[in-house]
Amino acid sequence: MNDELKSALAAWGVELSGPQTERLGIFAAELITNNAVMNLISQKDEPLIWQRHIADSLAAAPLLRRLLKPGALIADSGTGAGFPGMPLAAALENFRFELLDSNGKRCAFLGRAAAAMKISNAAVFQRRVGEGPKSPRYAAVLERAMGQLENILPQCLNMLTQGGVFLAWQSAAQLAAPRPELEKVMHKARAGLAEKFSYRLPGEQEDRFIVIFRKLGK
């Protein structure tokens, strides 16, 4: 991790200890080692894994610290290669994470990576969004790589306990696009828009956003 990236993280309120940085380095190495056969991320992204994937995931760390109590259970829904859940688990040791994905091979990789990182606050489960326990159990649900927000929002809100938060990573273009159905979906799902957090990754010219929705009722 270079100085420019450290400065960007510090500006967001993310300060990593030596052991935390080492665990993230192990995760990056495991991912690159397995990427050729598993296609976890674009091979063009391998040299940029810290900026484009790890830092982008860690942008949510100060938000989760502010919004949740220590010990809260957080779901990374559709985690894919482990983003944002695995970097956040490494950085936020006083929170519990469940990484959910429908692909068994990806889940097996993430289990091995968590063992190599020696983190105990992350568990991996093979399941789709909406599968698993029927009663709401998470204080927060995260979605970094998603389809239409209008489609995924109700399913993620259903996983939350009352007052819980859903964090959705969005680009400037996604936010600017007309979304006439979003208000209807939010009303039906009994959710409110809590805030929009903007940040910029090193080397990029446009802001990115994490949009936070709060579950208002059962």
Image: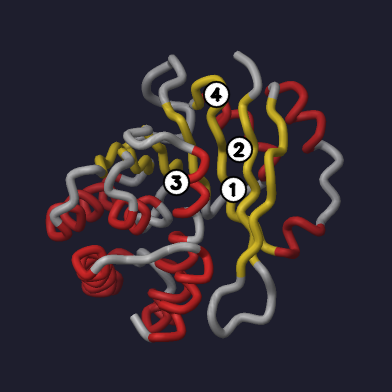
> Of discs 4 and 3, which sits in the foreground?
3
Of residue 182 and residue 160, the one placed in the foreground of this image is 160
Q: Marks 2 and 1: in contact by CB < 8 Å?
A: yes
Of the image marks 1 and 2, the number of the one nearer the N terminus: 2
Q: Residues within 10 Å of mark 4 (few under 14, many from 20)?
A: many
Mark 3 vs mark 2, CA separation in Å: 24 Å
Label 4, secondary structure: give it: helix
Residue drawn at (37%, 66%) of the image = 15
Report helix, strand or loop for mark 3. Answer: helix
Question: Circle 3 sits on which residue?
Answer: 65
Amino acid type shown at disc 2 = Ile
Can you tell which mark lies on residue 168?
1
The type of colouring in the image is secondary structure
Q: Which residue is mark 4?
A: 158
**Which of pointers 1 and 3 lies earlier in the amino acid sequence?**
3
Q: Earlier in the sequence, mark 2 or mark 4?
A: 2
Determine whether 148 is above or below 86 in the image: above
Q: Can residue 128 be seen here?
A: yes
Residue at 50%, 44% in the rendered image: 66
Mark 3 near mark 2, Cβ–Cβ under 8 Å? no
Q: What amino acid type should be assigned to the residue bearing mark 3?
A: Arg
Q: Residues within 10 Å of mark 1 (few under 14, many from 20)?
A: many
